Amino acid sequence: MNRLANAELLKLRKRRPLFWWTLVLTVGVVSVVYAIIAILHLSDPAHHDPAGGINGFQGSAIGLTLAGSVAAIMVGAASGTLDVSSGVFRDLVATGRSRWELFAARVPGSLALFLPMITLGYIVITVCSLGLAGGTPTPDAGLIARGFGWVVLATGFDLLIALGLSSFIGSRATAIGVLIGWQFIAAPLLSQVTFLGPVRQALFGGALDRLAPRVITADNGPLLVHSAAIAAIVLACWLAVLLGAGAWRTATRDA
Amino acid sequence: MQMPDASVADGYVVETRALTKRFGTRVAVDAVDLSVPAATAFGFLGPNGAGKTTLIRTLLGLTRPTSGDWRLLGRPMPADRAAALRKVGAIVEEPRFHPHLTGRENLEIVAAAREPEASARIPAALDRVGLTARADERVSKYSLGMRQRLGVARCLLADPLLLILDEPMNGLDPAGIQEFREMVASLVGEGRTVFLSSHLLDEVEKTCDHVAIIDRGRILMQGSVADIARTGQPTLRVRCGDPNGATDLITATPDVEHVTRSGDHLVVVLRADLDGGSDGVAAEVVRRLVHAGVAVYSIEPERVSLEERFLELTSRLEDPE
């Protein structure tokens, strides 16, 4: 499995546009935003707060999660379709290797590309929120650690569902379109439809909000999911369904 | 190279029994019984759309057959698929690669799916197909011929007992075809079996020693190339001094069915059920012509090419009768 995962990482790492866009979305965006706010603060401290501190940390953690989610969806969708779209899937199956193993190797392979980048992005926001606080309150170690766990959970979740969905439908572009449309348009709208009542707890965005440090998601309004256990179950169900569908399709498709 | 299983060494590397694959109502592979002897270059001939690639995909377990049984390297498929395919290298249709990776990296991808020793075979495989110097270029820059050779290198990572190559000579220039023919001969010389699917009859005849002919999903004939080429009606070609006078003399010879004129030759068709070959008839024809004072310049058995045999077999299918 380790060799297969390394091979998966090689395939993704050498796709230059994917690599650089992932780096831009995970590290570049937060770096640029911090730089702009820092310059604004330096030029007009009366009207612009310091870039760092707890406020900067909150905004940048949300920003990193949003941009990181797009990057995660791109990586996951690429991982789920690279072999099929290039025609190499047939040759891998013809080696006699289990199709389940071929699918399973995509998980560590794609995470191995993505997690170092999202970690680097989080290091940037941590350093900036502490170093550019300008005398305002700064996040403590506990919040930084919980924030990191949540950013990794939220973006890693997006990567895995993109991997599962793209493996299932066999189209990278469609999977990216569906997931970005769902995550940034459809799901936020559905979460506002009050007559859906507790059904809205099945939306994974609400479940991720429930598991986030409250300081980070304070501006998102009331929580849709009341229990952390329910949130965990919702996320597990989404993962099980989409990864299961992707694995099943990989195991049964004509090669 | 590892020695083949005892069951393989004694017999066939591919055996199918009534193997059938349907797509809806269309029968792509129709009750195929195929036996591929070990350590041979086996040509799998058929026109486009005959079912060659579908049969290969079925043999490799890439698609499920509708019915029938098959064994690969003596192992029942698909039950023992992983063990059988461990020693099989295959190119199905055109060889496909990740275009953004180099040739060497593409081999590393497939080696990772094979046993750990496969990675160590990459340099030798690249060397054998003559791609060492270009191995670190992206495959997107490769010609079709180079991709074909890289496909063969990918097969060699398995240290295969059986290589299944689907139309491997597409895109090769004449020198490449010659090199490929020599490589097939050397692989067979090492005790491996090369199963070579092609519609290039001449190349199969030059490269392979056994052949099966498929059309419309059915195996029409299989056996050694020499046997299949001989299976047509025995024929002699005679060049002599007085063709017109010789025609009557030869027609009256026992076991001669009929004689026709072809340029400066006479084509003498013998009885299909002739025992003991055409030598006896040839000797009698020469004796009669010489006795009649007709100068005989040459007489030889006419060799039926694989192409003629192939066209004869496949055109027979097109005949509604």
Image: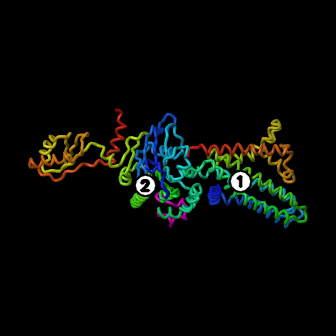
Q: Mark 1: few, some, or many residues within 10 Å (few <14, many ≥20)? A: many
Residues at circles 2 and 1 in contact by the CB criterion of under 8 Å:
no
The one of B264 and B107 positioned closer to us in this rendering: B107
**Magenta region: which residues?**
B129-145
- Residue B301 colored magenta? no
Drawn side of residue B228 relative to residue A11, left or right: left
- Residue at 19% of width from left, 49% of height from top? B238
Q: Residue reaching furthest front?
A: B6
- Disc 2 residue crowd, few under 14, some 14–19, many 20+, Cα 10 Å: many
* Residue B3 drawn at (x, y percent): 48, 55
Could you say which disc has been placed on residue B169 in the image?
2
Determine the secondary structure under disc 2.
Answer: loop
- Amino acid found under the numbered disc labelled 2: Met
Q: Which numbered disc covers residue A162? A: none
Location of residue A111 (image quadrant)? bottom right
Residue marked by disc 1: A72
Which mark lies nearer to you, 2 or 1?
2
